Image (cartoon, rainbow, N blue to C red):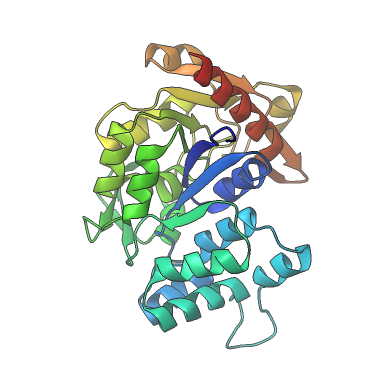
Amino acid sequence: MGKRKKHIVVIGGGTGLSTILRGLKTHEFDITAIVTVADDGGSSGRLRDDYDIPPPGDVRNVIAALSDVEPLVEKMFQYRFQNSEDLRGHSLGNLMLTALTDITGDFSYAIAEMSKVLKVHGKVIPASNKKVTLHAELANGDVIVGESKIPSATEPIRRVFLLPEDPQPLPAAIAAIKEADVILIGPGSLYTSIIPNLLVKDIKEAVIKAKAKKVYVCNLMTQVGETIGYTASQHVEAIHHHVGEAFIQYILVNKYTAVVEQLRQHGEIEPVLIDIEKLQKMGLQVFEEEMMLVEGEIVRHHAVNVANWLCKFAEIEKKE
């Protein structure tokens, strides 16, 4: 019998989640991605409203990230129509997931079938099988309705919440969390990609109770409308505030390098300040890795470095 694969559950959404998964799939992990369904903008938002389904966009990106098909097939799945007035902005993958959901009547079943077609490494599970709407209450008491509108906030975010208030998760998501060796929270937009998953009550409670090691993969940069001026500890505090309990045990942060210094500018967006002493006082064990990849004006996590770190981390925990 071969050695049991480490079961990794990754919770998040947006490009951060997809980037990390591209690195993880090259290793012998048993991967489950729990993906936010709070998006309501662009192609996803139009299909969400027209068909009364969860938005397919984040799920589509995760399926593509974990797929093992010819590059041309993945490129086709991610293809976005531009020249047609009716189809403009829609990606083929979004339309395929919507069609499968309309045919089967079940978003999660559509994801599972699409995952087979694209030979996905692991499982892709939406945080909820039904449509939800994300709201943000600002420091001045105003409430913004809709995930796509939250980044335009001009006041600090006090809290985010979902309506309906108690969306039901899929049993497979809860089972994966219970069986996990490591739970990765993030990376991704703090209030619109990460926290919405943890607002699903049963997911939140399962994560708190899980025996897995719980790791927050810290964002690299602050984000307009969400986290301008936030330090690493403030990211963690926001997650704990919404969950109602301090549950994160470890944090993976970017090591300060010359690249980080070059990115510091007079604009609003800048690298997240890593306040290690504060994190340690909060009871977190801090890991520093060079995980910033800069390509032109795009800054993203270095998927290979994060995956390699996780391999070492999983082995370290195994020997304890």
Q: As rendered, which of 105 and 252 lies closer to the eye?
A: 105
Side (left or right) of 252 relative to 144 = right
Q: Position of residue 170 (x, y in %)?
A: 33, 57
View extreme (left): residue: 165
Question: Which of the 4 quarters of the picture holds residue 155?
Answer: top left
Which residue is more in the foreground, 266 or 126? 126
At x 35%, y 28%, the residue is 211
Residue 123 point in image, percent of width and height:
50, 54
The percent coordinates of residue 313 (x first, y second) are 57, 23
Q: Which residue is outermost to the front?
A: 1
* Quadrant hosting residue 234: top left
Does residue 135 sit above or below 112 in this rendering? above
Q: Which quarter of the rendering shows the N terminus?
A: top right
Q: Is residue 265 visible?
A: no
- Tell me what residue is drawn at x 46 percent, y 52 percent: 151
Res 144 seen here? yes
- Residue 118 is left or right of residue 274, and the answer is right
